[in-house]
Image (tube, rainbow, N blue to C red):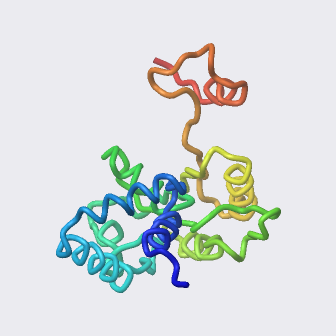
Amino acid sequence: MAEDPIERLARGLGKLPGVGPKSARRIALDMLTWSTDDVRQLADLLVEIKTNVRECSACFNLAVEDPCPICKDTRRDTSTIMVVDAVANLIAVERTNSYRGVYHVLGGRLSPLDGIGPDDIKISELESRVESGSIREIILANEPTVEGDATAQYICKILGTSGVQITQIARGLAVGSDLSLADQVTLSRALEGRREL
């Protein structure tokens, strides 16, 4: 007996990050109310994105062109590289409109328990960029997790003798957060990252 197509669609949608079984089923049912043209446009767009979007050969951002628009922008400071774990982090920083350097997307974080080592992410490519001699500063903007911290420490270790300044973005309390509800690690990092007013 053939599987119910709604369940097949829900299972496919459930592969999306943050979409659980209930949400996937709700989205699948909602899509049944769409016109055939709307569904076809979405399907065509998914195929187009999968076919045309690729990694930038310089920074490993995702883009249609190579190098990506950020790397091609002559107004950016190419001597400063912000290292991020994933393209989503790059997009978050870009939305601030406050960073004018370039990026390096690692494509993950070190996680020995999950079998992810230095050869599984783009650390050697970062070393090559630093060895080019034109880099003045590396800004580490890894996720504030055990794996993110381990990745940042590993990068510091391998680039420590390069002569390049290595900094890390400040971590601490979110704007509007309740100080009494913050955990100890967040409070400690907020204190470490304090600055003079």
One can see residue 120 in this view? yes
Q: Is residue 181 left or right of residue 59?
A: right
Name the residue at 35% across, 74% down. Answer: 63
Q: Is residue 124 above or below residue 142?
A: below
| Residue 81 place in picture, x, y as percent | 49, 60
Extreme residue in the right direction: 113
Name the residue at 58% across, 66% down. Answer: 106
Name the residue at 49% across, 73% down. Answer: 8
Q: How many discs appear?
A: 0
Nearer to the camera, 76 or 117: 117
Nearer to the camera, 120 or 194: 120
| Residue 140 place in picture, x, y as percent | 58, 52
Q: Is residue 97 left or right of residue 102?
A: left
The quadrant of the picture occupied by the N terminus is bottom right
Q: Is residue 36 left or right of residue 163?
A: left
One can see residue 137 in this view? no
Q: Is residue 34 above or below residue 165?
A: below
Q: Is residue 117 left or right of residue 41?
A: right
Quarter assignment of residue 131: bottom right
Nearer to the camera, 112 or 130: 112
| Residue 156 place in picture, x, y as percent | 70, 56
Name the residue at 58% across, 30% down. Answer: 172
| Residue 36 place in picture, x, y as percent | 20, 75
Nearer to the camera, 42 or 151: 42
Q: Is residue 33 above or below residue 8?
A: above
Extreme residue in the front direction: 1
